[in-house]
Amino acid sequence: MSVFAHLVGQLADLLQPLFGASAAAAAIVLFTACVRLLVHPLSRAAARGQKARAQLQPRIAELRRRHGCDPERLQRAVLELHAKEKVSPLAGCLPSLFQVPALFLLYYLFSSETIGGRPNELLGHQLLAAPLGGRWADALGDGGAFGGPGLVYAGLFAVVLVVAAVSYRLTKRMMAANTALTGGDVGEQVPGMGAVTRVMPFMSFLTLITVAVMPLAAALYVVTSTTWSVVERAALYR
């Protein structure tokens, strides 16, 4: 952890001439971009996998019609189909899973008073008027919603809302394309799928809660990564 803190501090020092007191925040954005670049090959593979899975849906629907009364046989048939076509149903989860350690590191780093037995100097860094180790509740107690820290969070919330709205439209478009491909009957074959389908487009708006409860540094990572994801999805799934 102390090594990671040192790297973030060094990167902030390099960016200080350009970003001043917000250099550490800029370092986090740059760190996030580097993580997403490393994960991008997995995202491309996930996009190819999702397109392949969408193409398999009519055949899976046919298997459900044939083996709907025998769940075990249906499961084997679906797994055999995925194996035959070399399509992994878990490929879409890998980009998110590989980002969990980076988010955990930032969360811990900006939630700890000491690192390696020494005071955590990174807690003194800010994004404009908001401390990177603070939370939205702290900002509300320090000047209210329209104080300096509160306005920083208002800006982040605005970015999240715009990104979530774009993500909502992308998700709806992709779901409509899948429905057209499958004839609209796949969701009817899976218990509870209809409810999941209705809720899924709104999942991106949950980022608002994440930004509100996490330290600002981790929230900045989430906002940057989510924005990257939407741009990436628009490019990969067009």
Image (cartoon, grey):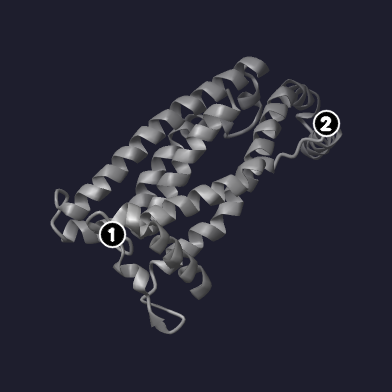
> Quick one: label 2, few (<14), some, or many (20+) residues within 10 Å?
few
Task: Report whether 93 appears left or right of 154.
Answer: right
Q: Residue at 29% of width from left, 57% of height from top?
A: 20
Counting every numbered tag in the picture gives 2
Label 1 is placed on what type of residue? Ala
Question: Is residue 213 in sight in this rendering?
Answer: no
- Height in image: 158 above or below 219? above
Label 2 is placed on what type of residue? Glu
Q: Residue at 80% of width from left, 29% of height from top?
A: 67
Q: Position of residue 73 (x, y in %)?
A: 83, 36
- Height in image: 188 above or below 140? above
Q: Residue at 42% of width from left, 56% of height from top?
A: 27
Task: Report whether 194 appears left or right of 159.
Answer: right
Q: Residue furthest bottom?
A: 117
Task: Give the quarter of the image for residue 158.
Answer: top left
Res 21 label: 1
Q: Are marks 2 and 1 in contact (CB under 8 Å)?
A: no
Q: On the image, numbered disc 2 is attached to which residue?
A: 85
Task: Give the quarter of the image for residue 58.
Answer: top right
Q: Position of residue 46 (x, y in %)?
A: 66, 37
Q: CA distance from mark 2 to mark 1?
A: 53 Å
Res 207 label: none
Task: Report whether 235 appears left or right of 225.
Answer: right
Q: Residue at 69% of width from left, 31% of height from top?
A: 48
Q: In the depicted view, which residue is nearer to us: 46 or 187?
A: 46
Q: Position of residue 62 (x, y in %)?
A: 77, 21
